[in-house]
Image: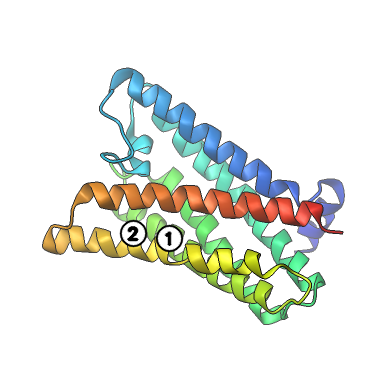
């Protein structure tokens, strides 16, 4: 952790949120463009995000490599956010729980990038589980930490509580698809919504910490 603190002295920790989210969004769109160039069937209603990791025309390379890079960047971003909240008198235990959620989410991204579904399905599923459970716990524990700080706008905490059900809804709908035939298109669309809301949450927190003293 001391090495992280030294890194923040050289590179402002606030910028990791923008760097990670920026690379994530741009790599997703680049991978989609490459994928669609050889398979126009790709839509956010018919293909999971992870399908990009198995795509042709180098869309898989763009997606998988970026997931690994993003996962590493977000570890630094979540740790900085936890330190920021701690410096604003958040409870240490809560910020550690929050960081662990962010760490699990980040490790999930790395595993998804290393193990595409067609190459190593079981490991890919484990990575995806890490990702969505980590997303849920990040929303909850960062939200609780923020809610208990009087100086922080409560809307920031409430945003996490609003977004928190999305990863659970996605995993539940996926389970329902395999058990009772819940429409796959809806499940896939929920995953894309969960992804974009997570990027929004990260960017919003980056903006908040950037504008804070």
Q: Which residue is mark 1?
A: 132
Q: Secondary structure at mark 1?
A: helix
| Crowdedness near tag 1: few (<14), some (14–19) or many (≥20) residues, C-alpha within 10 Å | many
Marks 2 and 1, how far apart at CA: 9 Å
Image quadrant where one finds the C terminus: bottom right
Q: Residue 131 falls in which quadrant of the image?
A: bottom left
* Residue 151: x %, y % from top left: 79, 72
* Residue at 50% in and 43% down: 67
Report the front residue among 126 and 205.
205
Q: Is residue 101 left or right of residue 165?
A: right
**How many marks are shown on the rendered structure?**
2
How far from the left and from the top, in percent, is residue 196? 48, 47
Q: In the rendered view, tell whether residue 191 sits above or below residue 166.
A: above
Q: Is residue 106 left or right of residue 60?
A: right
Tag 2 and tag 1, C-beta contact below 8 Å: yes
Q: Residue furthest top?
A: 37
How far across and down, in percent of the image, does residue 78 sit?
Answer: 65, 59
Viewer-nearest of labels 2 and 1?
Answer: 2
Q: Which residue is mark 2?
A: 170
| Coloring scheme used | rainbow
User: Looking at the image, is mark 2 or mark 1 earlier in the sequence?
Assistant: 1
Q: Residues within 10 Å of mark 2 (few under 14, many from 20)?
A: many
Q: Check the image and report above or below for 37 versus 167.
A: above
In the figure, 65 relative to 100: above or below?
above
């Amino acid at each position: 952790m001391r090495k992280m603190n030294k890194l923040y002295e050289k590179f402002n920790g606030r910028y990791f949120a923008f760097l990670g989210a920026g690379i994530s969004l741009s790599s997703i769109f680049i991978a989609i463009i490459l994928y669609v160039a050889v398979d126009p069937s790709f839509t956010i209603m018919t293909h999971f995000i992870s399908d990009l990791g198995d795509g042709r025309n180098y869309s898989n390379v763009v997606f998988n490599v970026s997931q690994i890079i993003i996962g590493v960047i977000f570890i630094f971003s979540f740790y900085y956010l936890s330190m920021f909240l701690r410096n604003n008198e958040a409870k240490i235990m809560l910020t550690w729980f929050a960081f662990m959620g962010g760490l699990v989410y980040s490790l999930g991204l790395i595993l998804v990038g290393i193990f595409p579904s067609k190459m190593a399905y079981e490991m890919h599923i484990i990575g995806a589980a890490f990702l969505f459970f980590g997303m849920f716990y990040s929303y909850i524990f960062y939200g609780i930490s923020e809610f208990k700080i009087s100086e922080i706008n409560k809307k920031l905490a409430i945003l996490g509580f609003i977004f928190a059900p999305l990863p659970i809804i996605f995993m539940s709908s996926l389970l329902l698809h395999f058990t009772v035939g819940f429409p796959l298109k809806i499940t896939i669309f929920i995953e894309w919504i969960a992804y974009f809301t997570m990027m929004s949450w990260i960017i919003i927190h980056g903006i908040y910490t950037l504008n804070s003293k």
